[in-house]
């Protein structure tokens, strides 16, 4: 699966990090933002609660990708793209489409791995903002 430079830059921007931050920096930024936008902090205000839930979904999607992302080392090579992502097949569908992530989420749901199902759905939504089957299954 090839993820565009724009998608990867968006994930780093979501976590408020510079490109190619270390795994430790990604984890620390995720934890900080998860605390900052956690819905439990906004139980008194329904509008802020809803907004924090939506923002936390986006943060989770970015972290789900970046925690396993290993940027390639560019040792003087002249490449046309900064990023060429090799995806672990046990974590992501082979064709990398939103539909494939929804199918993966359905599988995870059927075997009781709900956190993995949610991450797959979040990834489908991150790849295509208006992919309604992902929203329907996420409920």
Image (cartoon, grey):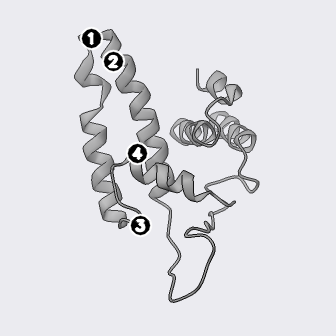
- Number of the label disc, if any, that sits on residue 20: 3
Compare marks 3 and 4 and give the one earlier in the sequence: 4
User: Position of 129 compared to 67: left or right?
Assistant: right
At label 4, counting other C-alpha atoms closer than 10 Å, the crowd grade (few under 14, some 14-19, many 20 or more) is some
In the image, residue 135 lies at what x, y percent?
Answer: 62, 25
- The residue carrying mark 1 is 45
| Depicted 94 relative to depicted 31: above or below | below
How far apart in space, not on screen, are marks 1 and 4 (Cα)?
24 Å
Q: What residue is shown at x 60% (from left), y 36% (from top)?
A: 125
- Number of the label disc, if any, that sits on residue 14: 4
- Number of the label disc, if any, that sits on residue 124: none
Compare marks 1 and 3 and give the one earlier in the sequence: 3
- The residue carrying mark 2 is 49
Compare marks 4 and 2 and give the one earlier in the sequence: 4
- Secondary element under disc 1, as helix, strand or loop, is loop
Determine contact: label 1, label 4, CB under 8 Å.
no
In the image, residue 25 lies at what x, y percent?
Answer: 30, 61
- Secondary element under disc 2, as helix, strand or loop, is helix
Position of the N terminus, as image quadrant, is bottom right
| Depicted 59 relative to depicted 55: above or below | below
In the image, residue 12 lies at what x, y percent?
Answer: 42, 54
How far apart in space, not on screen, are marks 3 and 2 (Cα)?
31 Å
- Secondary element under disc 4, as helix, strand or loop, is helix
């Amino acid at each position: 699966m090839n993820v565009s430079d724009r998608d990867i830059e968006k994930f780093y921007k979501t976590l408020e990090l510079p490109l190619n931050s270390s795994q430790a920096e990604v984890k620390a930024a995720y934890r900080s933002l998860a605390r900052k936008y956690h819905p439990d902090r906004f139980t008194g205000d329904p509008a802020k609660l809803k907004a924090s839930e939506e923002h936390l979904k986006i943060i989770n999607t970015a972290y789900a990708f970046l925690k396993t992302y290993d940027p390639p080392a560019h040792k003087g090579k002249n490449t046309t793209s900064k990023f060429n992502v090799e995806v672990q097949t046990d974590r992501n569908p082979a064709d990398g489409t939103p539909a494939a992530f929804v199918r993966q989420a359905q599988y995870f749901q059927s075997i009781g791995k709900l956190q993995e199902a949610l991450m797959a759905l979040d990834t489908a939504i991150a790849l295509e903002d208006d992919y309604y089957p992902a929203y329907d299954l996420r409920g």
